[in-house]
Image: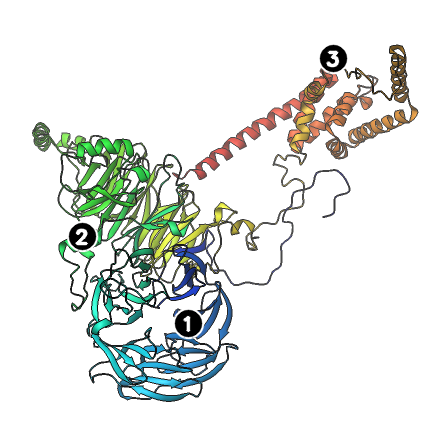
Amino acid sequence: MPHSSNDTPLVKRQKVTTVDRATKSASNASRLFAPFRTVGLVSPTSVPFSSIPLGKTTFQITTSVGRSLQTYDLRRGLNLVFVSRPQTPADITATLAWKEKVYAAWGGSRKGEEQGIWVIQRGRKVGELALPSDITEPIKQILVLGTWIIACASTRIEVFKTATLEHYTTIYTMSAANNGNEISGGVVSLPTFLNKIFVGRKDGWVEIWNISTGKLIYTILPPTPDAGAVTCLEPTTALSMVAIAYASGTLIIKNVLTDKTILSVEAGNPESPVTSVSFRSDGMGAGQDGRKDGVMATAGPSSGDITFWDLNGGGRVMGVLRSAHNPPSGEGKTVRGGVSKVEFLVGQPVIVTSGRDNSLKTWIFDETPFNAIPRILHERSGHAAPVNCLQFLPTDFDGADAGNKWLLSGGEDRSLWGWSLRRDGQSTELSQGNIRKKAKKVGILASNALKHGPTTTLEDLKAPEITCIASSLNRDGGMGAMPGNQPIWQRSQTKKQGQDAEISGMTGWESVVTAHKNDPLARTWFWGRKRAGRWAFPTGDGSNVSTVTISPCGTFAVVGSESGGIDMFNLQSGVHRQRFPSRLTPAQARQLRLQQSRQTDDVVHFHTETSKFSAGMGKHTKAVTGIVVDAMNKTVVSCALDGKIKFWDFLTGNLLEEINWAPMTFPTAIRYHAASNLVAFSCDDLSVRVVDMETKRTIREFWGPKDTINDFCFSHDGHWIIAASQDKIVRVWDLPTSHLIDAIKLEKPCRALAVSNSGEYLAATIQDQLGVTLWTNKSLFKHVATRQISEKEIGLVDAPTVSGEGNAGMLDGAFEDSEEADDNAVVAPSLDQLSSDMMTLSLVPKARWQTLLHLDLIKQRNKPKEAPKLPEKAPFFLPSTTGAASTQGQEKADGAVEDLGRSRITKLDKARFEENFASKLREGAESGNYDRFIEHLKSLSPSSADLELRSLTPGDGASSASNELLHFIHALTARLKIRRDYELTQVWMTVFLRLHSDEVMASPVLMEALSEWKSYQEKECTRLDGLVGYCSGVVGFLRSPRT
């Protein structure tokens, strides 16, 4: 960048011209939030996983999460190593891992939908298979046979060359009635069968095709006419044998060479067919001692069980792994379950399973002592159903979790999860106890593996669906809270509670409380231990819990009921502490009845006493929809469907104030912001109202949603309110201005919202979708315009994705240049002063004029304390000198300096320098324009300016034309009149009076000029004080969220 020719300060960059740009289409991206990523997805689809060994040390397992693939490393404990990018244009329908590549088929599930097959390596797309243009069926399975790639659709099979990825041929299954030629059991190949594939059909036939010639070689018929469709094909570890499972539940092992049935077992039933079969290949696991070969595992989507078979001696059931995955829920399709695939790892006593419950698990068989049923080895999972509620963990007193790391979520699958936003491997589900052990005690896990229908139902052993979460880490004891195995969710008062309270007082106690659907108990949780807590708090009136909250101190839990009752419990001891309103003693009850009788007799007294609330009065008449406790533990605020908002005393339980919005509307939820002491309410009239806790008055009302408000929250600083409604739009209102400043329109409604304590993340859940989407706050890293927008400007926005494609990182906003040209932007004028009525400061650096103001102090501070000393001993190679000669040399040096001072050249330079300063001052005095003089003075260094001010002279005294002191005062007065360089004028006048105060006091002319300057100075100072005070008041009013 070229430098300026002079040393004057650079002018700040300003927009001086408008930029002509081509008209762009309006961007639908949010102005405040950028999509970041999605957490909580492991294996949410029914697409089976694909595994591949990496040498002899580990395996990589790839799962589908919609339009992306996630690859996990088994040696690292199922650690996520790759996420494929870019996303496929449509949902993935089949995957296959082969060598270092993964093949993914996508699309075709809907009529007219685009489809294809991508080749992905290390998470990146490296190639693509071109499908025939006439294919209209989705690819359900991919298989690689050396030089061939097989893509199986519903009624056709596409064959590609592995080396060039070129399409080779298409194989159509033999036609049959009632769509019997549909491929229902997939495609497999057998070792030593070169170029041969086995195709399972809906009519029970298994066709053998030569893919090189495209000819049908042989057809294997079903064992019985009513066997049904082929549901699964799997080659055995023995050569020339294949396992065939049918829809009727029959599973046979067929010798392909002789077309004879070697083994036949009833592995399922018509209601629960087998869809996944795998054979153990390490030569162990069968027999009484587990030393024989021949172990088979079967599973299906109708249950969460996995059955293990010993194929020696005709086949028998060795054991059943109960509830390996969640079974299909009786509550509907929203809660997913069932096993989608089981697979033994090659040469390992390990089996990998995946289910529609969004989980991927590995199990290992113990050899000593031998056990036919494996135990869990690794697990990665998430919510099996959509999420109902979200909450970021608050910052604890040590700041260890920083309020940004952990996100709590409660889903329809009856689970409570803690998601780590820094490391996915730390995310975990909070334990509800040993569910499998409970199931065995109550007999749910029966020993009959062939029981018809779903064999396990564990829903009754888990807590009901979570509807509300409250947390406070101030009393959380971490991993050391309440050591040992403590009973969970105790309902009755026990004698052991005193001992528990003493232990918890030293180690900490529960920090999370949840409300559950159609449940009269509010349950506690240990966050540090990631497990269920000791207490289950019942409502005082016996009705179901509707909402919960925790006091900021972390000691008390407040529970609201559907009948209007509010109860407070101590989290340390589990004891009931207060009721809102408080319970009356017999004496208080008699006094209340007496007071009511007096009020009915005296109408005037009744009207004067209606504003006061008696003890024990004021209970909500309908379900409580929200409760909060203020930051000082003094006030409890509750709202209910009766349209009333009540303010209770925290200690006594008495009603202090009440706001009645009935019958106009009623609040459906409440949110509290401690820093601004504001509470916000979402109402059934599709509005959000904000109430000041101090004045108990409504200060803001926000309108705009066209349907029910699902959730809302404050921003971290209390300046925004973010609300998600059923009309698929997330709206952001600015509290100080009451403007709608941003809106995000999604494809589906948002169910829950949460903002992190630092404001970096906005977490949201989408209706009928698994996982939690994260958005980053752009305003933390760059300026974002907050002008009001209209509903017409709201456009559809893409939600965050698992792969992160098209998403913005946390710091991306800090490095991107804003290219948006505001149509209403005002072009900055090129004038030095915007208006003559505005006081303008100079562009001189602050350090320069501050140095001039304190130059004497700086010189005094920099003055050396001692004169320089000669070295005690000179180096040996220098000639020695006497003290007299040294003194003589010093005198010669001093004389040289004096001669230099008397040098003619030096005198001429000094005179020329002084003449430049004085001439500009005289020119300004003659013309009345001191601009050139002021600009010259501004360009001087502090020491030069101090020297020039010291050199000012009063002249001969007879004429004012030669009085430089008078001209200087007039120059500063003229600068003050035009309101420019205000701070420099003050500094120059201060230094001038410090240097020439005696001369000014002795001259009446100078005193008169100084009096004129003083009058203008006082007038301008008074005007500036008024303007600054007014502006600071307006800014304070706008910045306060309570206004």
Q: Is residue 451 above or below residue 204?
A: above
Quadrant in the rendering for residue 229:
bottom left
Depth check, front residue: 982 or 977? 982
Q: Give the mark toward the camera: 2 or 3.
A: 2
Label 1, secondary structure: give it: strand
The relative height of residue 21 versus residue 994 in the rendered view (above or below) is: below
Residue 817's place in the image compared with 981, above or below, is below
- Binning the other alpha carbons within 10 Å of mark 1 as few (below 14), some (14 to 19) or many (20 upward) gives many
User: Within 10 Å of the Cα at label 3, are there few (<14), some (14-19), or many (20+) other Cα atoms?
Assistant: few
User: Residue 860 or 397: which is nearer the viewer?
Assistant: 397
Q: Is residue 612 visible?
A: no
From mark 2 to mark 3, how far is it between C-alphas? 104 Å
Place of residue 1036 in the rendered image (x, y in percent of width and height, measured from the top left): 46, 35
Q: Sequence order check: which comes first, mark 2 or mark 1? A: 1
Q: Which residue lies furthest to the top in this view?
A: 884
Q: Which amino acid, by three-letter code, is at mark 2?
A: Lys
Q: What residue type is labelled 1?
A: Trp
Q: Do callouts 2 and 3 mark residues in contact (Cβ within 8 Å)?
A: no
**Lower sequence index among marks 3 and 1:** 1
Q: Nearer the viewer, mark 3 or mark 1?
A: 1
Q: What sort of colour scheme is used for the picture?
A: rainbow
The disc, 2 or 3, on the residue closer to the chain's N-terminal end is: 2
Which picture quadrant has residue 728?
Answer: bottom left
Q: Mark 3 points at which residue?
A: 1002
Q: Quadrant of residue 553?
A: top left
Q: Name the residue under label 2.
A: 438
